[in-house]
Amino acid sequence: MININVLENLSYISLLKDTYLVRHNRNVCQYSLIITEAMNLPEKSIEIIQQAAIYHDIGKIGIPNQILFKPGNLSSAEWQIMILHPVIGAELLSADIFNKEIVEAVYHHHERWDGNGYPDGLARKDIPIAARIIAVADSFDAMTASRPYKKTLNKNQALEEISRCAGTQFDPEVAGIFISLMDDKRLVKTSIQKSLSL
């Protein structure tokens, strides 16, 4: 059983840290639900993915501001701290009251299809499906979001990058579904409206 009140409190903490993170998490949730709907996953999976997507970056509240908001490239030492955020997020959500699959999705959302991700270097279908879906949604929103210290890609550029990384960074099936869906603006608008009503 998910303790929604606790999750909402964590969301407020994140809001104080960076309002962008809250917007990003909501966008990732919407994109993830679009993919989930197209894959015809069971209702239980939809609920898991919805919650995991909203809180996938909650661990960033444990990352120092000077690293989280650094305008340039991170040093090796700073990067080693940054990549702890999935672990921190999973620890925040890791309690008997939280669904284990939600915690696992948050923990593994930076794994890569080719096994070169973090924190555990899982590959292919050893990565939970929720994490594979969130990985695509997360990357797309990060690439297209307006931030003062990073280059913003337009939709087509971001989709080209998703396509290029399918089979290496991303599950090729999930990436292909997302690209196809994003080409159907009418379907995306309808799906986002449905996700907002959940």
Image (cartoon, rainbow, N blue to C red):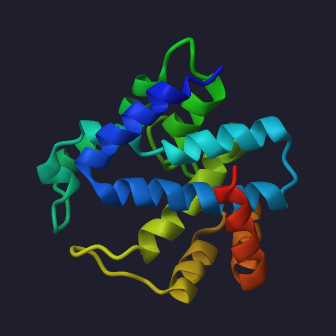
- Name above or below for residue 97 compared with residue 37: above
Say which of 7 and 107 sits in front: 7
Q: Position of residue 8 (x, y in %)?
A: 45, 35
Q: Residue at x 41, y 24 (%)?
A: 91
Say which of 198 and 154 sits in front: 198
Q: Position of residue 23 (x, y in %)?
A: 42, 60
- Name above or below for residue 37 compared with residue 184: above
Question: Which quadrant holds residue 149?
Answer: bottom left
The answer to whether residue 76 of the structure is visible from this angle is no
Q: Residue at x 25, y 46 (%)?
A: 16
Q: Residue at x 71, y 74 (%)?
A: 188
Q: Residue at x 77, y 62 (%)?
A: 173
Q: Residue furthest top?
A: 96
Q: How many circles with numbers are drawn on the protein?
A: 0
In the picture, the quarter occupied by the N terminus is: top right
- Name above or below for residue 53 compared with residue 90: below
The answer to whether residue 92 of the structure is visible from this angle is yes
User: Left or right: 45 with respect to 192?
Assistant: right
Say which of 42 and 67 sits in front: 42
Q: Position of residue 155 (x, y in %)?
A: 54, 84
User: Left or right: 47 with respect to 157?
Assistant: right
